[in-house]
Amino acid sequence: MTKPSCEDTTLVRARDLHHGYFSFTFAPYPRVAECHPGSFVHVQLTSTDIYLRRAMSVASVNTRRHELEIIFKVFGRGTAALSRFTTGSKVNILGPLGVGFSKPRSTYHPVLVAGGVGFPPLMFLAQQMIDDGMDPKNIHFFYGGRSERDLVERARIKKMGIRFYPATDDGSLGDKGLVTKSVEKFIKDHHAKERLRLYGCGPEPMLKAVDELGMQYGVAGQISLESPMPCGIGICLGCVVKLRVGGHARVCCEGPVFEIGEVVL
Amino acid sequence: MTPDLRVTIAGVEFANPVMTASGCCNYGEELAQVFPLSKLGALVTKSITLKPRLGHPVPRTAETASGMLNAIGLANVGIDAFIKDKIPFLEKQKTKIIVNVAGATINEYVEVSARLADIGRVDILEINISCPNVDEGGLEFGQSPALTEKCIAGVRKVFPRPIIAKLAPNVTDITQIADAAHQGGADAFAVINSLVGTSVDIDTWRPRLTNNRGGLTGPAIKPIALAMVDKVYTKCKLPIIGIGGISTYRDVIEFLLVGATAVQVGTALFVEPDAPVKIVEGLKEYMKTKKLSHINDMIGKVRKYT
Ligand SMILES: Cc1cc2nc3c(=O)[nH]c(=O)nc-3n(C[C@H](O)[C@H](O)[C@H](O)COP(=O)(O)OP(=O)(O)OC[C@H]3O[C@@H](n4cnc5c(N)ncnc54)[C@H](O)[C@@H]3O)c2cc1C
Ligand SMILES: Cc1cc2nc3c(=O)[nH]c(=O)nc-3n(C[C@H](O)[C@H](O)[C@H](O)COP(=O)(O)O)c2cc1C
Ligand code: FES
């Protein structure tokens, strides 16, 4: 377990990605080197009606410049308050938190399945796999959303040179329908020839489908879960999930990344 | 001159008056990653019951204005696993160890307490007769003077070291319950546990907690907690550990002034896990500025209007 700490940092770049999505870069964040794909930070929002921190996955780091990026979508009052921070604002970050994704060996073909605002940790994972020497052509990135507008940062993901498969509920971009339908077709076509590894992050119904696909086709992998997280460090017991072997695990510290087949969704 | 932060409750001396609140630091291991627990006056564990409990299904927490609701449902490892897996860690910590005990029946409280009596490193028991999050026991004990007395008296017989009775705020007159706990043999009061509350999602028309209601905690409850401490201090005889919405040293001083000898920090740990360390530093600075040499110089010293 990495020791979490509260660090004051500054919002140095705020990009409006449109349609309610924002990218925030904080610096200097002294602990960037300890952030891994799937790690998250707990961002403090000081206001009377927003007492608790909000969990945000690490979307990228720049270790040389000590920069940490998060990407979020305005959803409720917490993320709305976050979006109102302006560059130069001091923000307190508790982290790095959680157990992240384990990277596959280079002979594997990772299949990344992102749903909506679940894409940032998977984008980070793809980048790290490339940095570690994996051929980008072997990385398959499925990205699903309601419509084209929900699939933000597409240009950035495509620029990595990885294989990119968008899917939208309304058919405005890529396959029409649930992204997991496209993933299933891909698994059927490829799992006999290639050693696949599934990685999922997104809304719970999507994760449930990824989990089931993994078990049905015998493809191992991991999914990153969300849960209401008051503390993020394992002391409140508010964030638990049921394990298939029985008992509970805390999403914030035993997770947020779990093996396919490990949790009851 | 460095101010003296030591306080004594029922013969037990604490390095400072700042403790963690039950259910807000698990069994201490996680917070030990954030700061050395020796910085605390005492660590108070999650409520321990006879059998392990998983608690209520999620969502079992919900944010509210200046606080939160929880209905964790006394999730804990149970007394056997606590003694086997958690005590070895706690024994090594250079702070006082207070184990919080809960149960559905008086027998359960007594049985758990008897097991803890044999472990010398458990300095004090805190008896949770006030949890709003279980159907059985808990509040029911805390709302009845007779049951409170019986429960504390039962524990008193089997546990040779000091006992703190943790009182519920959801009662007509908290001093009646406090007096009953005193009668039963308690050595101190912890005031207060969380207040019953709920919250509803207007999109789904569902309560935000699967338990339908939970306990309100955090800064929102501080004024209520202060008034309760004041009331107990004025009418009852035992030392008080003040709890409710404490997040800074300033909050602590308010509690001391109305009569608390020590305090516990709960929900604030979720937002600032190192809050106790900052609080202790803040207390020292305040005492230096005010030229106070001892914590006792503040306890109960509120200058009330007459
Ligand atoms: C490990 C982890 C990583 C996350 N990463 C991101 C990210 O990269 N980008 C992003 O936009 N969002 C992310 N989230 C979700 C984010 O933390 C917010 O909780 C969520 O967007 C709700 O928005 P809000 O705070 O505006 O809602 P509010 O209505 O203000 O939230 C109220 C409360 O509900 C809790 N809550 C409600 N639903 C959820 C949920 N599904 N998951 C977690 N908490 C919930 C919140 O913690 C908060 O306490 C992540 C959550 C977790 C647990
Ligand atoms: C998530 C959570 C779990 C709690 N669990 C317990 C518990 O197991 N036993 C207990 O006596 N009190 C429990 N409490 C109550 C606290 O110990 C404390 O009395 C209350 O939170 C008020 O203090 P605060 O405002 O500083 O949090 C819990 C509180 C919270 C927020
Ligand atoms: S968020 Fe508190 S234990 Fe996980």
Image: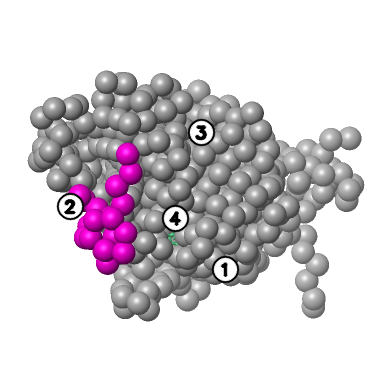
Residue under label 4? A152
The disc placed on residue A49 is 1
Separation (CA) of disc 1 from disc 3: 29 Å
Which region of the structure is painted magenta? A163-182
Query: In the rendered structure, which amino acid carries the disc numbered 3?
Result: Cys
Above or below B37: residue A20: below
Label 3 with label 2: CB-CB less than 8 Å:
no
Assign a secondary structure to mark 2: helix
The disc placed on residue A181 is 2
Front residue of B87/A97: it is A97
Assign a secondary structure to mark 4: loop
Residue under the point 88% across and 51% down: B290
Residue under label 3? A35
Of the two numbered discs 4 and 2 on the same chain, state the one appearing first in sequence: 4
Q: Does residue A167 show up magenta in the picture?
A: yes
| Labels 3 and 2 positioned on one and the same chain | yes
Q: According to the image, what is the colour scheme of the structure? A: one colour
Query: In the rendered structure, which amino acid carries the disc numbered 1?
Result: Asp
